[in-house]
Amino acid sequence: MTMDSKKSSADRHPKTTHEISAIFLKQYPLCFQKFLRDIENESANDLIVYLEYDPVEEADRDKVFYQLMSYVVKTCLDQGTLKDEQEYTSKYPSFRDVIKKCFSSLLKISQKTEVEEFLTSGGMGDIYKGRYYLYEGSRVWNPCIIKIARHEDIKNYQQQQFTTYGHSIDFEQAQKDLSDRFFREVNITNKIGQPWGVQAYEAGWVSGRSHNGVFLCLEFIDGLNFKQFHEKLQQQCGASLSVGAICELIAQVAEAMQRFHNFIIHRDIKPQNLMVVLRGGDGHRFARVIDFGIAKYVEKDNSIFHNISESFNINDVENAKRENCFRGTPDYAPPEQFFDSTGVDCLVDLYALGCTMFELLDVSNAPPLCSQGYSSGANARDLNALQKLHEQGLPEVKFRHKDNPKVRQVLKKMTAPNLMLRYQNAARLLEDLAPLRNHEQLAQAVQAIADNTEYKNPDAKRSWSIKSLLGR
């Protein structure tokens, strides 16, 4: 959706303004009276202290801290004494996300990308909602998602490489890894196109300077990832997705794989990297595949995809040497990916999609191997043990309602440790999913979440009617 902001380019970065809410002023007078008096005298040093004056109720602490921090940002910005965001997050770690929201409007990304609000933090940095202006100086913009990896995020990534994969890299290499990941995601994502993925707008250095970090600007999707979607459905409606709806979601991802397996292997398929479009889609295709940052380029004689950057192959060789041949997410990776993540083919994505399907179907709502004592997110010491568990085969899925032998058979073939027994391509998987998928049931679940209405799992109804017939 394209919009006209009705603002001149001079209005795009307004000065930060903040007025303390009258509701909170009335509810916590001692807190704010003391704070306003101290900040005027430049003696407001510890914001936590003010939360204890009335005291502030636990449910309101984030909201009240936001009022205090926003006022500090406004006042110190006007005075030219505002400290770096990281200094505040280090001082108040329990209010990290609140502080990031207060600083959102101050972020300058590029001439065409503007930050509006902080959303969350991910494995590769912070995620914001913003605007992408189609032309520099234009008033026409698209809503977008902005990923930003700054200095502290690069340091965290550097540490993660040692903790998770058992190898160390210097800061410059970590920075290069993340920048390469963002730049390649723009190239790959735009080759895939809609309705299988998302559009990537641009990537680059924040404010044009490498020491400010790297950013990636993507099309905004009004939706949830698979894990969030299923959990929200359970919380909001008290029902899980039907087996037919799950098969439809998995089939839509397999259709996307048919497209991108012509030129790349994703290597990190998991519920968090698969999106359900709630609003703004075509009403038919709800699943989107995202995060192609560690995708592996497939060399094929295909003129449509042949012009992808040759640096992909070079990066894969360098990464393989440095990473001890593992890239991906251990919970969803097949045995062969632990041995050599650069030599894998499309079968790794089909296996990971099977693990995702298991998580949606199983009563645990967790990755397959969590039931065997491994929490999601392994470290280097667990990699060998996890690889052996994947080699032994996944545990039997426990359906929430009636057992479905045909779905169980498809799942077993998706996640077969033996490569010869696994589906060899997405087309064969789609053939077996065809009689199992139910678009109408998925559409009903999506509408229930989008409109905050009731949803009932038809599997539960059938299960109850069968029990009734048996005289329960």
Image: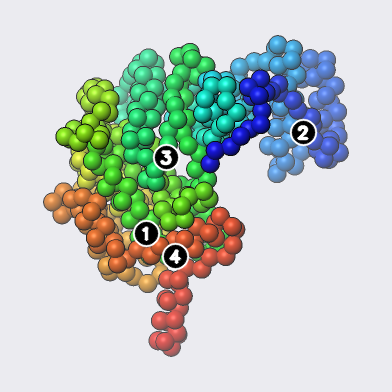
For label 2, the SS is: loop
Q: Residues at badges 1 and 4 in contact (C-beta under 8 Å)?
A: yes
> Is residue 159 positioned above or below 469 on the image?
above
The residue that disc 1 covers is: 248
Q: Mark 2 points at which residue?
A: 52
Precedes in sequence: disc 1 or disc 4: 1
Location of residue 401 by image quarter: bottom left
Q: Is residue 394 visible?
A: yes
Q: Give left or right: position of 115 versus 276.
A: right
The amino acid beneath tag 3 is: Val
Residue 441: mark in rendering = 4
Q: Would you call the spot at circle 1 few (<14 residues within 10 Å), some (14-19), or many (20 or more)?
A: many
Point out the frontmost of discs 2 and 3. Answer: 3
In the depicted structure, whether residue 336 falls above or below residue 366: above
Mark closer to the chain start, 2 or 3: 2
**First in sequence: mark 2 vs mark 1:** 2
Please name the residue shown 18% across and 50% down the image: 424
Residue sitting at x 74%, y 31%: 67
In the picture provided, is 55 more to the left or to the right than 164?
Answer: right
Amino acid type at mark 2 = Glu
